[in-house]
Amino acid sequence: MSMLPNQKAYHGVLEQIRIFIHENQLKPGDKLPSERELAESLGTGRSSVREALRALELLGIIETRHGEGTFLSSYRSFQTVKILASFILGNSSTKESIITTRKLIEKEAAKLALQKVEDKDITQFKKIIQDLINNPKQMHIDFFTLILNKTENELLLIIWQLILEFSQIFDKGFYDSPFYQQLVDLYEKEDYSRIEDLFMKQFFS
Amino acid sequence: MSMLPNQKAYHGVLEQIRIFIHENQLKPGDKLPSERELAESLGTGRSSVREALRALELLGIIETRHGEGTFLSSYRSFQTVKILASFILGNSSTKESIITTRKLIEKEAAKLALQKVEDKDITQFKKIIQDLINNPKQMHIDFFTLILNKTENELLLIIWQLILEFSQIFDKGFYDSPFYQQLVDLYEKEDYSRIEDLFMKQFFS
DNA sequence: TAACCCCTAGTGGTCTGACCACTTATAATC
DNA sequence: GATTATAAGTGGTCAGACCACTAGGGGTTA
């Protein structure tokens, strides 16, 4: 393992794991080599490998099962967010930037999705609004998950999901009740220009 | 340390560190107890303490200095996003989504910055355009770094910087030469509505 | 044949002790 | 008083040991 001088061992391990995942095209749920194998193949100690794995586990990238092995995580663990929140909370400028950025992404995603929304999506949007009328938080998540998926921009989706988890700790995380139906209306009319206005009303309400 | 049955040791350590920080009212930059002290006071091994600390370090909550000790992080670095992105981008994201997202952020940042641009910033923008007329790539970076800083949104800045690095691999990464001057003109006129149009012309050119 | 049980190999979880590299403060020296 | 050498404290790393847990093989039994 060619390593830069001031690099900590577990950083090297992190990088090697990333490369391993990439080269072997590992998907969520796939198994990683055992800690002992990794240590040997990287020419490092098992404890250094574990430090890297523990960090990745806390980030929700991998999950470990005692006696079984280490696996690429198939879902984003909320435990990460809880821990982060308890440490981070209190920095108001950070909170502000998280909320702003989340809303920004939702607005732009809504615009990007416009061209790709089909009739069956409209139906789906309406169904989400109806079914979750009494659970605005979940409605928001389902609603925008669909929008983000329609953008076909995986990076944007991932960033949004991550920020959403953070923001939910200190923000109600959803808009006024009529907002969602109004957005669907704009989708039906394919009215791009008024999407921005609709969001702006929410941001400053 | 009274521990729940299925709890991993380093989770307990995490919790204890959190409590320690709160009880002692530690602020960014303050020193934490040494690894050996923590291990002894928590009745656990040093390796378990280290696993917890490494995870916190990766999350940007603490920083360690060899030979000195462990300190509460003095700035909020969104390490999480960096790590996650480097893992995720390696796998699945397409060039398309990276470029789209970068441009999206630049457009929205330009709009967010509008309200905060002062006369001296206008001067600075013009200076960047003049000085780097022969280095469009660097001009773009300096130009938008200033914009992103004006948004006072640290999260957006970090995300942008990260995406920029990746996108430069396969995208020229800058707009048409007149674009920048035109944007400055809009800042001088404080013309919010036409910023979007200006960007759209770039995106589809 | 089918169901059951036990044992074992492999894996993560944890601890200990050792040594190194680095920083800081102290003490000795000039 | 300034400089230098030393020691103590700290994080960085490794090796080895043992435990707890899981899955699978192989034998036993009905």
Image (tube, coloured by chain):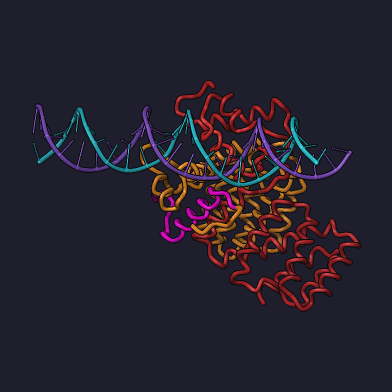
Chain colours: A orange, B red, C cyan, D purple
Q: Nearer the viewer, residue A60 or A118?
A: A60
- Tell me if residue A18 is in the magenta stretch: yes
Residue at figure coordinates x 56%, y 67% from the top left: B95
Span of residues in magenta: A7-34
Vertical arrangement, residue B164 with respect to residue B154, above or below: below
Say if residue A43 shows up in the picture.
yes
Residue at figure coordinates x 49%, y 59% from the top left: B91
Q: Nearer the viewer, residue A137 or A30?
A: A30
Report x, y in % for residue B118: 89, 59
Compared across the picture, whether A183 is left or right of B130 comes to left
Q: Residue furthest top?
A: B2
- The number of numbered badges drawn on the structure is 0
Report x, y in % for residue B47: 51, 35
**Which quadrant of the figure has residue B144?**
bottom right
Residue at figure coordinates x 64%, y 59% from the top left: B162
Say if residue A167 shows up in the picture.
no
Compared across the picture, whether C20 is left or right of A202 comes to left
Vertical arrangement, residue B156 with respect to residue A51, above or below: below
Report x, y in % for residue B146: 79, 61
Compared across the picture, whether B181 is left or right of A195 comes to right
Vertical arrangement, residue A164 with respect to residue B158, above or below: above
Identify the image quadrant of the C terminus of chain A: top right
**Which quadrant of the figure has residue B195?**
bottom right
Report x, y in % for residue B127: 86, 70
- Tell me if residue B8 is in the magenta stretch: no
Vertical arrangement, residue A133 with respect to residue A24, above or below: above
